[in-house]
Amino acid sequence: MAGVTAGAGGYRVFGNNNTEQRKKNRMRSHSRVVIVGGGMMGVGLLYHLALEGWDDCLLLEKAELASGSTWHAAGQCPSFIGDYSLAQLHHYSNTLYPKLEAMTGQATGWHGCGGLRFATTQEELDWFRYVEGISRNIGFRMQVISPEECRRINPFVDVAGVIAGAWTLDDGHVDPSGCCKAMAIAACRLGATITSGNRVTDIKLRPTGEWEVVTERGNIVCEHVVNAGGCYADRIGAWVGVHIPYVNLRHQYVVTEPIDFFFLLFFFIIFFSIFFFFCFLHFLCTFFFFFSVFLRRMMSSKPCTPRRSTRSSIVSPRITTRCGRRG
């Protein structure tokens, strides 16, 4: 059984034809097709060309596979497409990705979770019906459902104002890097060649109609050249005088390893939140207990009234006389 590894010289297949395959994977000067860019688009094209028998194909990647635009992708694989040709392409992809891992042994991260979309106007509902007709023709599963059915499928959604939903059962998502590498392994097993760590610096049209691809490790003459440069596609197109309306947007990502401090801080916050909650609860219970005792005593005590004496007493004023001696 053959195995596939990646290195600075590219992806190589080792098996019974080890020597022959190593000769093919060396940097060569001629190829039928040269694909510039080792992302999902370039590797996917390489695989399907090899699948059709075009094994004299070479893919050039300046760094590592899936290290450019593919790495930034979310990996969503929807089926809800209003264009017939694109809908066929999406349906084919969503049936291929689940099989790639079994074909190559490389995990793709496929999760077939399905998808929900909501219509809030009659025009959007008409569009749902149109796409539903495309789904029946192509073969991917789709249903137009009621808002109640949407809530049954996903109890967390708010269906206020929703008149219908589109449930596409074959939607999913993949790990873009893993899926790209799995397709690269499949392409190499079909005879294609991938060379990583080799930057393309120019593309020239020769008088014979062939293309000369200039790289850091030598030039390659080919019949067809494919621009799959992702975010660098506009620069590659400028080499041959083709304007590609492509605009790059800069994003910032912060990727860290697990941080023990935040892990401990999380449990610290949880612990003291529970502690203070029970302290507050104890305070309330104590307060209401003593307050109820106080009210009970107040309600049980009688008002005090002055007592009247039954005996009538006459208090005579005190008379002091001064007696003198006779004398």
Image (spheres, helix red, strand yellow):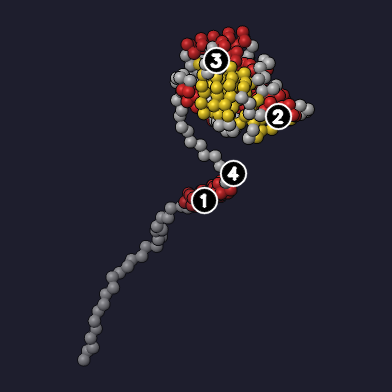
Give the residue at mark 1.
Answer: 283
The circle drawn on residue 208 is: 3
Q: Nearer the viewer, mark 4 or mark 1?
A: 4
SS state under label 3: loop
Q: Do callouts 2 and 3 mark residues in contact (Cβ within 8 Å)?
A: no
> Which mark is drawn over residue 258?
4
Residues at marks 2 and 3, CA–CA distance in whole angstroms = 30 Å
Q: Which mark is first along the chain, 1 or 4?
A: 4
| Numbered badge on residue 101 | none
Q: Name the outermost residue toward the front.
A: 207
**Residue in the picture at 52% in, 16% down:** 207
Q: Residue at x 54, y 39 (%)?
A: 255
Mark before the other along the chain sequence, 2 or 3: 2
Q: Residues within 10 Å of mark 3 (few under 14, many from 20)?
A: few
- How far separated are the C-alphas under marks 4 and 1? 39 Å
Instruction: State the CA–CA distance, disc 2 to disc 1.
Output: 78 Å
Asked if 265 appears above or below 240 in the picture, the reply is: below
The quadrant the C terminus occupies is bottom left
| Residue type marked 4 | Pro
Position of residue 121 measured from the top left corner of the image (x, y, whole percent): 47, 14
Secondary element under disc 1, as helix, strand or loop, is helix
Q: CA distance from mark 1 to mark 3?
A: 91 Å
Which quadrant holds residue 137?
Answer: top right
Mark 2 to mark 4: distance in Å? 40 Å
Q: Amino acid at mark 3?
A: Thr
Give the mark, 2 or 1, whose residue is nearer the N terminus.
Answer: 2
Q: Is residue 317 above or below residue 153?
A: below
Give the residue pinned by disc 2.
Answer: 22
